[in-house]
Amino acid sequence: MISLDDMAVFAAVVEHSGFTAAARALEISTPVVSKRVGALEAALGARLLNRTTRRLSLTEAGRVFYQHCRRVVNEARAAEASVAHLQEEPRGLLRVTAPVSVGSSQLSRALVGFMHRYPELEVDLDLSDRRVDLADEGVDVAIRVTLQPPQQLSARLLHRTHRIVCASPQYWDRHGRPQHPQELESHNCVQYLPNPEFNLWYFSNDAGSQGVAVQGRFKVNNVNSMLEAALGGLGVVMLSSTIVGAAIRAGRLEPVLQDYSSPSASIYALYLPNRYLPTKARVFIDYLVEWFGTGDTDDLAVAV
């Protein structure tokens, strides 16, 4: 079998247009480069390069072989890099963004254990409900609660949740409890400003599915404020179980329309598509997958 090292040398000769330039790039001597290429030609039984005093050119066999060399060498380097990533100790600055609702509760608690596990890492956590451009702002990982992750980003599911329609018992006592989704059109529903898709509430049951475009007096760009509005009896919200679970269990919010299901708005870790995800981001996402699955997040599930 031909040598991978010889293939790498040959690829370098082609890519640097000469033996001397390739030797310089590989930090070996020019005679060694020439010897390696000669050995490769002998092993293959074919001339790969046309040599003149002024220039080198690829033969037909050389062109075909170079395409394979480039692919094989790149795959070998990728394999080496993958193993190296596993061996690296995560260090440096990890920049994370998350919505206020998730970040101030679950994520903040998760980060305590994560930073104890990786003492060489620093973490900058930006809690904001705005849409952050990961590339422009140099963010490593974004945590988002969404119906569907954006296609231009890579996504890892952290926790599958569901949306619940609820309000305070006092609100329902004053305005009546809806028995059908369409009745929500006459209610004061708290709306989420940054993402209009969350203001079209979808419901489905055995009879089919439907969407209800809700209206209300209060619109806000912060999920915690929506929760507070509902707790204060201002109106109806449709929020993730991660947000309203504790209040429902405490009797401060009352769910309705439980015979209907709604699209899952789950928690995802988002990051820029990258064949070699930085170690600091990879171990953080792996940690969150572990943490969300341990049962430490006791306020994620809603027993209704």
Image (cartoon, rainbow, N blue to C red):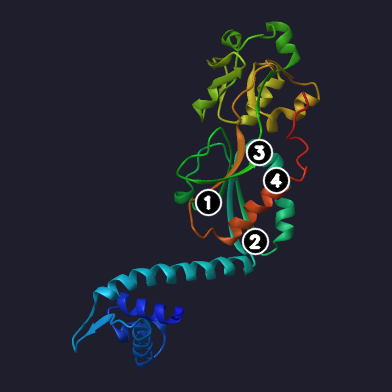
Q: Which mark is residue 121?
A: 2
Q: Earlier in the sequence, mark 1 or mark 2?
A: 2
Q: Earlier in the sequence, mark 1 or mark 4?
A: 4
> Where is 130 relative to 154, above or below?
above
- Spot the residue most to the front: 45
Amino acid type, mark 3: Val
* Position in image of residue 61 (x %, y %): 28, 75
> Where is 158 relative to 204, above or below?
below
Callout 1–callout 2 Cβ contact below 8 Å: no
Label 3 SS: helix
Is residue 103 toward the left or the right of residue 14 in the image?
right
Look at 69% across and 9% down and name the residue there: 177
Callout 1–callout 4 Cβ contact below 8 Å: no
List the residue tagged with mark 1: 139
Is residue 250 toward the left or the right of residue 100 in the image?
right
Label 2 SS: strand
Look at 39% across and 81% down and name the residue there: 9
List the residue tagged with mark 3: 102
Q: Earlier in the sequence, mark 2 or mark 3?
A: 3
Callout 2–callout 4 Cβ contact below 8 Å: no
Mark 1 burial class by Cα count in 10 Å: few <14, some 14-19, many 20+: some
CA gap between label 2 and label 4 equals 16 Å
> Where is 167 relative to 155, above or below?
above
Mark 4 burial class by Cα count in 10 Å: few <14, some 14-19, many 20+: few
Amino acid type, mark 4: Ser
> Where is 175 relative to 16, above or below?
above
Residue 300, picture quadrant: top right
Mark 3 burial class by Cα count in 10 Å: few <14, some 14-19, many 20+: many
CA gap between label 1 and label 3 equals 17 Å
Label 4 SS: helix
List the residue tagged with mark 4: 108
Q: Earlier in the sequence, mark 4 or mark 3?
A: 3
